Structures are given as C-alpha cells and as structure tokens.
C-alpha cells in the first residue's frame, strides 16, 4: 500500500528507538529484565507496526497497525513515568523529558496519519 520509508513518522520512530536504546544503557543493571526490556520492546514495536501496516492491502488494516504503534508509543511514555518515580536521578531527568517530548510527537503524528486514512476516499 505505502512505502514506509517515505513516511516521516516512520523515520522519527526509528530514530526514537535508537535514542531509547541508548538511554536504557544509563539505567541500573537491576532493571535489565524489567523496565529496560519493556521500554525497548515497546519502542521497537512502534516502527515495526508502522512498517507492517504500510505493507497491508487496506486502509482499515493500516489504521489497525497505526493504532498498535500509537499504543506502543504510549507504553514507552508510561515506562518513562515509572523510571522517573523509581530512579529519580537528576542526570536522567533532562533526557527523560526530551524523550517524552519526542514520544508525544510520535503519538500525534501516528494519530494524524490514522485520521488522514479515515478521511481519504
């Protein structure tokens, strides 16, 4: 249906995964099998679902995959909320804030693309 490489949200989502992975290296080793694993899987799910949806045969199916990508982005944001509560180190705060802003932008872009598909004939 679409070439996902041409979608701006896809490129932002791929960049976001890289940043989340780099950030997760700053978390304590005790989070290796919990928050680190969870935030990486959720972040990775965003571009994977955009890509899978773009390859679908219908707008309806593409919209479903965009919904999953959106929910995964929200999951990442919730992980950042948990990290703030559990590991409130000052050196993490500015990076968390930056990643939350970027995550919100991806949410908005994903939602906008989904709405655009809804209104197209």
Image (cartoon, rainbow, N blue to C red):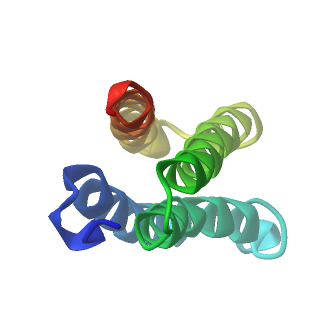
Task: Tell me the residue at 32%/32% (across/down).
Answer: 120
**Which residue occupies the foreground of this view, 24 or 38?**
38
- In the rendered image, residue 89, in percent from the top left (x then y), is placed at 56, 41
User: In the image, 120: left or right of 33?
Assistant: left
- Note whether residue 28 is visible: no
Image quadrant of residue 88?
top right
User: In the image, 107: left or right of 2?
Assistant: right
- In the rendered image, residue 82, in percent from the top left (x then y), is placed at 74, 37
Image quadrant of residue 94?
top left
Q: How many marks?
A: 0
- Note whether residue 61 is visible: yes
Task: Tell me the residue at 65%/41% (across/down).
Answer: 71
User: In the image, 47: left or right of 39?
Assistant: left
In which quadrant is the C terminus drawn? top left
- In the rendered image, residue 111, in percent from the top left (x then y), is placed at 44, 31
In which quadrant is the N terminus drawn? bottom left
Residue 60 position (above or below residue 116): below
Task: Tell me the residue at 66%/32% (across/down).
Answer: 81
Residue 22 position (above or below residue 120): below
User: In the image, 4: left or right of 76?
Assistant: left
């Amino acid at each position: 249906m679409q070439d996902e490489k041409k979608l701006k949200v896809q490129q932002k989502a791929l960049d976001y995964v890289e940043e989340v992975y780099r950030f997760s290296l700053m978390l304590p080793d005790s989070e290796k099998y919990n928050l680190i694993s969870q935030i990486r899987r959720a972040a990775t799910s965003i571009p994977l679902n955009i890509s899978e949806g773009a390859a679908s045969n219908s707008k309806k199916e593409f919209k479903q995959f965009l919904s999953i990508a959106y929910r995964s982005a929200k999951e990442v944001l919730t992980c950042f909320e948990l990290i703030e509560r559990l590991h409130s180190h000052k050196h993490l705060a500015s990076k968390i804030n930056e990643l939350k802003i970027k995550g919100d932008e991806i949410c908005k872009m994903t939602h906008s693309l989904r709405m655009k598909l809804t209104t197209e004939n």
